[in-house]
Amino acid sequence: MRDALDATPYDALLLLSFGGPEGPDEVVPFLENVTRGRGIPKERLKEVGQHYFLFGGVSPINDQNRALLDALRKDFAEHGLDLPVYWGNRNWGPYLTDTLREMVADGRRRVLVLATSAYASYSGCRQYREDLAGALATLEGEGLEPPRIDKLRHYFNHPGFVEPMTEGVLRSLAELPEDVRASAHIAFTTHSIPTSAADTSGPVEGHGDGGAYVRQHLDVARLIVDAVRERTGTEHPWQLVYQSRSGAPHIPWLEPDICDHLEELHGAGVPAVVMAPIGFVSDHMEVLYDLDTEATAKAAELGLPVRRSATVGADPRFAAAIRDLVVERAATENGRDVSPCALGALGPSHDLCPAGCCPARAPKPAAAGADSPYV
Ligand SMILES: CC1=C(CCC(=O)O)c2cc3nc(cc4[nH]c(cc5[nH]c(cc1n2)c(C)c5CCC(=O)O)c(CCC(=O)O)c4C)C(CCC(=O)O)=C3C
Ligand SMILES: [Fe+2]
């Protein structure tokens, strides 16, 4: 019997995710929740609604989260980490506010949050923190005492996140026809965001100059390319590209888009491509539609062999990484020295987002950061 692991002062882990519809009737209300006040053109919404209808109105993200919950509970139980795991979403049921209310009823006072977004950016970090603050305000309005909330640091460069993706890329390369395998390009993809959001992502003062979103993805891409070279002896040419652009056409977003990139590679005589969606924690709709459907059709039209490599999903190594991060953060909170685990050039991310990290266009209260109105 191993020594039990210690999560105190925390008494619960909250898996905080995006949410997604579970049937055709839920698609439009879900999209309304996501885009409220975000200035997304109607045409774009209709188009994205069609992506969901193509899959029966069911987003893959919920089953992915259920699988991750199972993996976390199993891993914690096997390692003697006594920490209940809850699940709440920002944009669809089970809603974050309802889950937090349940947690308060269960007597949880110190909550650690795992967001299903691995990188810095307004959409991937502060927006989650704003919704946490909104949920806490609702509980307060109901006369409940809100629990104290901390958020786990960004895990993009944790080996338990990078290694399953490296293995996925190796598997995809092995599936390509042998005669084109060694010359295959790797197209690392992530969610496009407005360039203004990319330029201000991450901590600014004293930590860098913004730009963390792209820098963090480039670090992960290099780690994977290096690990692939160590295993196969081949240094594959690669590029970080983008997908799932939204918003008005006159606003600049990160480019190139994966489909344009495939066209360009084909034009340059590249014989095969692995698309590696490193920006996504699991097989979201963006992966199933934008890559597996749209980009794959584009490649077929070009006669370009492509494979899409696996996301991390509920991989046991990812669950183990989360356990590691929980134990690390608990030790830090208890004033013990820790050696945070991180690969690559950037080092471990901050525990507490400093004030102004990943700023919003219109400032709102955000929990679990140095500028949180909640302690
Ligand atoms: C960086 C980023 C992530 C990764 C970090 C994270 O994981 O959080 C992410 C995740 C996701 N985005 C998702 C869905 C949507 N995102 C939208 C719109 C937007 N996303 C943006 C960025 C991101 N989004 C942005 C800048 C917008 C424009 C509107 C705005 O500035 O807020 C829209 C509106 C329609 C459209 O235009 O696409 C939808 C439906 C789903 C669920 C998928 C499923 O069901 O499996 C997930 C996991
Ligand atoms: Fe999104």
Image (tube, rainbow, N blue to C red):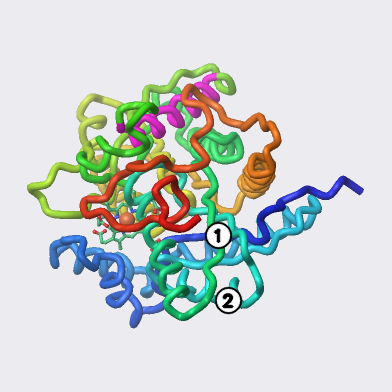
Residue 38 placement: quadrant? bottom left
Alpha carbon distance from label 1 to label 2: 14 Å
Residue 183: image tag: none
For this orientation, the residue located farthest to the left is 250
Residue at (39% x, 73% y) in the render:
21
Q: Secondary structure at mark 2?
A: helix
Closer to the observer: label 1 or label 2? Answer: 1
Q: Within 8 Å: ligand 1 and the Cβ of disc 2? A: no
Report whether residue 317 is seen. Answer: no
Q: Position of residue 298 (x, y in %)?
A: 25, 46
In this rendering, the answer to whether 246 lies above or below 197 is below
Image point (35%, 40%), residue name: 189
Magenta span: predominant SS is helix
**Under tag 1, what secondary structure?**
strand
Residue type of the residue flagged with mark 2: Glu
Q: Position of residue 138 (x, y in %)?
A: 42, 74
Asked whether, in this view, residue 116 is left or right of residue 66, the answer is left
> What residue span does the magenta drawing correspond to?
210-229
Q: Which residue is mark 2?
A: 102
Is residue 197 shown above or below 98?
above
Q: Residue at x 25, y 64 (%)?
A: 48
Q: Which residue is mark 1?
A: 148
Which is nearer the eye, 32 or 51?
Answer: 32
Q: Earlier in the sequence, mark 1 or mark 2?
A: 2
Picture coordinates of residue 159 (x, y %)?
A: 59, 34
The residue depicted at 48 percent of the width and 29 percent of the height is 178
Circle 1: residue type:
Arg
Q: Residues within 10 Å of mark 2 (few under 14, many from 20)?
A: few
Residue 218 among those drawn in magenta: yes
